[in-house]
Image (tube, rainbow, N blue to C red):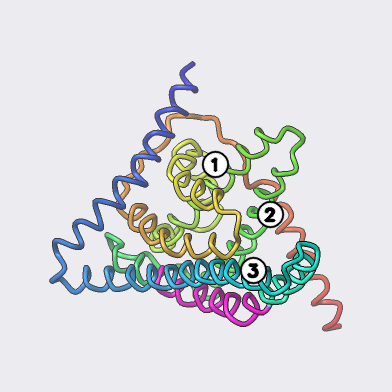
Amino acid sequence: MEYLKIIIFGFIDGLYDSIFFGIYVITTVLKQHQTAQSINVLKRIRQCCLLGGLLMFSMIVFNYTLKLLNLVVFLIFGSHETHGKTWLWLESILSTLFSALWVLPLIILCRILTALWFQDIADTSFKGRPQSFKSTSKLIADILFSLLIQLLFLIQANLFYFFPIGLIGQLLSILHTSLLYSLYSFEYKWLNMGWELYRRLYYIEKMWPYFFGFGLPLALVTHSLPNYYLNNACFSFLFPLFILSANETHLEPSKSDYKIPFFSIVVWISNKLLVVLSNTSLFFNN
């Protein structure tokens, strides 16, 4: 019963912090726009929103253009059978061209720019003196290993969609996605605090109810969008608020002794992959 209470209150605290602190920071920045720090934060947020908004707007315009073209094809051919066959291949060609020539390059550009802007937002809004790693090579190795962990954990989250009981699979997928988004949000802060990857993962596993609640709003939004490109656009649009919220939080150590090893499988796989790559490298060098 005590553990259930810790889970519920931890979840509520995380949900509250993700929403409240994001709104609080934005309103504070808008009120204090004369400072160099707040100007830079607001500028980066606007840029992230602009890129995400541009992608969403282009997707909406394209979908309405397809509907208009569908009507034109129907007026030209008239016959439902001829219209259906013609529109099937025409829509496929147009969608492929649009994705390859516009959406995909824009997604790549968004990923690169927003990664830089997210880091800038996190560094600017970080409160305290950044703690550096012992060496640059150690920092790079930590970041690269973290990216591998995050990629594998994202795959793990998506695999729950194949769970035999659909509703349970969706809930587990949302839980894992929420934890992953929390890791995304807090990682900038924790890197500035000098925390290594295993400490970051341990902290999330130890306080998983809080981080489930913190990442849930963003997870629900992205899970509700069936389109991958809209998902990315919406993420770019909202994620800066979660970085700001993460920087404002003051977490207390969890009172629970029940750590759930959510990342244990992906950490094990990552370690095995590194061993294989290391052995392969040694083989070719010899």
Total number of numbered discs in the rendering:
3
Q: Earlier in the sequence, mark 1 or mark 2?
A: 2
**Residue numbers of the magenta segment:** 97-118
Q: Nearer the viewer, residue 143 or 156?
A: 156
The answer to whether mark 2 and mark 3 are in CB contact below 8 A is no
Residue assigned mark 2:
155
- The disc labelled 2 sits on which kind of residue? Ile
- Judging from the image, what secondary structure is the residue with disc 1 in? helix
Q: Nearer the viewer, residue 224 or 201?
A: 224
Name the residue rendered at 70%, 47% in the picture. 265
Seen in the image, is 278 located left or right of residue 201?
right
Say which amino acid is labelled 1.
Glu
Q: Secondary structure at mark 2?
A: helix
In the rendered image, residue 150, in percent from the top left (x then y), is placed at 60, 58
Circle 3: element type: helix
Q: Can you give x and y, in whole percent of width and height, for residue 95 in the image?
A: 66, 72
Check residue 65 for magenta coloring: no
Where residue 114 appears, x then y in whole percent?
A: 45, 72
Cα gap from disc 1 to disc 2, whole angstroms: 18 Å
- On screen, residue 189 versus residue 24, left or right, reads right
Q: Residue at x 62, y 43 (%)?
A: 173
List the residue tagged with mark 3. Answer: 70
- At label 2, counting other C-alpha atoms closer than 10 Å, the crowd grade (few under 14, some 14-19, many 20 or more) is some
Residue 76 position in % (x across, y down): 69, 74
Q: Amino acid at mark 3?
A: Asn
Q: Which callout, 3 or 1, points at the residue further toward the start of the chain?
A: 3
Disc 1: which residue: 205
